[in-house]
Every structure is written in structure tokens, then in C-alpha cells.
Image (cartoon, rainbow, N blue to C red):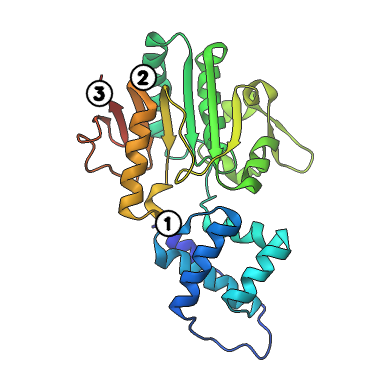
């Protein structure tokens, strides 16, 4: 819901003086979706089509072009492709978003996992610019469990993965971060931004991964995937949850966003452990 409100606040673009607001043919949009997958490997057909169409056509109107002209721009200039990928994927996040859920991970779930695992394996799926996996890594450090933990962090967007690997953040990313965590795990830069310390970085591995197409690793103790699947069509969403269930160890946990519910969780082999935290039945 928040994402929809922020999208409506986009200001007017610098259109050419001869720009005319127009509707774009549906068949051109369908052609564009197929071309995006063929040329760039991004399967938009599993996303909610109205969202994809709306966001793409904002860009068409920004540059006063049609779908075929815009495809030519994406093919010839990487800056346009990067902008398009950023608009299609969800890259709005912060450290410890909905903090009360993170404290449940810290105080109960991660210690429980540690009791039953010699090595802990976590996955931040759709990690965006890194706030989520680094939040996990900070909790692991707080519990003195970094020596036995590997955190995989994946996203489809190469641009945000590069920012995640740099680990530099504006102050607004820390609205939910305890002051002591900020002082302990970040260094303040001269320009007022903050850089994550190498001790946190070293247990996080970043990789490009398409949740809709690529194979999943197995034997995770915890998967965090928040505010990603709400933009998928129901069929794609159900398939994703099924694959997450297969990727978890028996007794492993799936942590989803506060606007997401898995209605068929029993069919997938989950039980509700806490609100928005599911556990794979052993």
C-alpha cells in the first residue's frame, strides 16, 4: 500500500513541448514484455500486469517514445536499462524494518536455530541494496554466532547488488536502528553517510538471482523474503512459496513482510510460528 502511495507522488517529467498524453496499444505492451524476457532475461509476465504497464508507461511518457522506440533505448544505452530495472523491481527498504519482528529473530528464533544447527545458513531473497541481509548479520554478531553463519543475499537487479556490496547508506536508512547498533557496526563518513564494517560484511555473500527462473539452493535454516511477492500474480506467488518450503530444512523458518500472508501454508508444509513467521513442519 505504501508503495502505491509513493508512486503517485512522482512529479511531472520534463516533457517535450509537443508531447501529447496518449494511450498505448495493449498488443504493443504484450510485445514489449516478451522482448524484455528475450533480450534481458527478466520475466515480467509473472508480475501483476497493471503495475508493470503503469510503471513502464511512466517512462515512455518521460521520454516521449512508444514501446518499440523505448526498447531500442534499452538495448543501446545501459543507463536506460538500469533505470527500467530499478522501476520494475522493489528497492525501497531500511535496516530492521518493522523492528519488533527482528527482535523476535534475535531473541528467540536465531538462538533456536543455533541450538539445532552446527552451521547456520540464511537467505535474504530479494535483498535490494543490502539493508536486510546486513540486519541479519548484525543480529548474528550480537549473538556471537558469526563464526557458524553464512548469509546468502540475492536480487535480480545488478545495480542494487553493487550498492549492497559497497555497504554505504544514507542516514534515513537507520530510522529503526538502535543507536548502539549504528555506533558499533558502522563508521560515519565525512559526507554524513555510514559504511557497514567489514566484520559484518564478511559473512554475507551477494549473488544475482531471479526468483521466478533460477534454481534455489537447499538446506536453509531461515529464509527472509519481505515485500517482494505482493507484486507477483497468484500463480507465481504460490510457486515461489512452494520452492521456499523445499529449500528449507525441516524446522526451518520463513519470514515474510507485514502485508503478506500465506493462506495455503498447511498445504505447503508450514505452520504459523508467529505472525508473518512460518516454520516448516518437521
Residue 186, percent from left and from top: 66, 29
Residue 12 seen by the camera: no
Element assignment for label 2 = helix
Residue under label 1, please give it: 2
Compared to 175, does 144 lie above or below?
A: above
Q: Earlier in the sequence, mark 1 or mark 2?
A: 1
Element assignment for label 1 = helix
Q: Earlier in the sequence, mark 2 or mark 3?
A: 2
Element assignment for label 3 = loop
Compared to 26, does 80 lie above or below?
A: above
- Kindly give the residue lying farthest to the right in the view shown: 190
How far separated are the C-alphas under marks 2 and 3? 18 Å
Residue under label 2, please give it: 108
Q: Residue at x 47, y 81 (%)?
A: 25
* Number of callouts: 3
Q: Residue at x 59, y 35 (%)?
A: 207
Using the rendered view, name the quadrant where residue 162 is placed. Answer: top right
Q: Is residue 62 left or right of residue 234?
A: right
How far separated are the C-alphas under marks 1 and 2? 29 Å
Q: Residue at x 56, y 43 (%)?
A: 128
Amino acid at each position: 500500500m505504501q508503495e502505491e502511495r509513493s508512486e503517485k507522488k512522482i512529479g511531472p517529467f520534463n516533457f517535450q513541448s509537443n508531447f501529447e498524453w496518449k494511450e498505448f496499444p495493449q498488443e504493443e505492451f504484450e510485445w514489449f514484455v516478451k522482448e524484455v524476457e528475450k533480450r534481458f532475461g527478466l520475466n515480467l509476465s509473472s508480475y501483476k500486469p497493471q503495475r508493470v504497464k503503469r510503471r513502464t508507461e511512466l517512462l515512455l511518457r518521460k521520454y516521449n517514445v512508444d514501446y518499440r522506440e523505448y526498447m531500442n533505448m534499452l538495448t543501446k544505452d545501459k543507463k536506460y536499462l538500469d533505470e527500467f530495472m530499478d522501476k520494475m523491481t522493489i528497492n525501497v527498504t531500511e535496516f530492521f524494518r518493522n523492528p519488533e519482528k527482528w527482535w523476535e529473530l534475535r531473541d528467540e528464533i536465531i538462538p533456536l536455530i543455533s541450538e539445532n544447527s552446527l552451521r547456520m545458513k540464511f537467505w535474504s531473497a530479494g535483498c535490494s541494496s543490502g539493508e536486510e541481509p546486513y540486519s541479519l548479520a548484525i543480529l548474528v554478531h550480537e549473538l556471537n554466532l558469526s563464526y557458524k553463519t553464512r548469509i546468502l543475499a540475492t536480487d535480480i537487479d545488478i545495480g542494487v547488488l553493487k550498492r549492497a556490496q559497497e555497504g554505504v547508506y544514507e542516514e534515513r536508512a537507520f530510522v529503526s536502528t538502535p543507536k548502539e547498533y549504528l555506533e558499533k557496526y558502522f563508521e560515519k563518513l565525512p559526507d554524513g553517510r555510514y559504511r557497514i564494517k567489514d566484520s559484518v560484511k564478511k559473512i554475507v555473500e551477494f549473488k544475482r538471482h531471479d526468483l521466478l527462473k533460477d534454481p534455489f539452493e537447499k538446506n536453509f535454516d531461515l529464509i527472509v523474503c519481505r515485500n517482494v511477492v505482493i507484486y507477483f500474480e497468484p500463480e507465481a506467488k504460490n510457486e515461489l512459496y512452494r520452492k521456499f518450503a523445499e529449500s528449507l530444512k525441516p524446522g526451518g523458518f520463513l519470514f515474510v513482510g507485514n502485508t503478506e500472508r500465506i493462506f495455503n501454508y498447511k498445504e505447503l508444509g508450514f505452520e504459523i510460528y508467529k505472525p508473518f513467521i512460518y516454520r516448516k513442519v518437521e
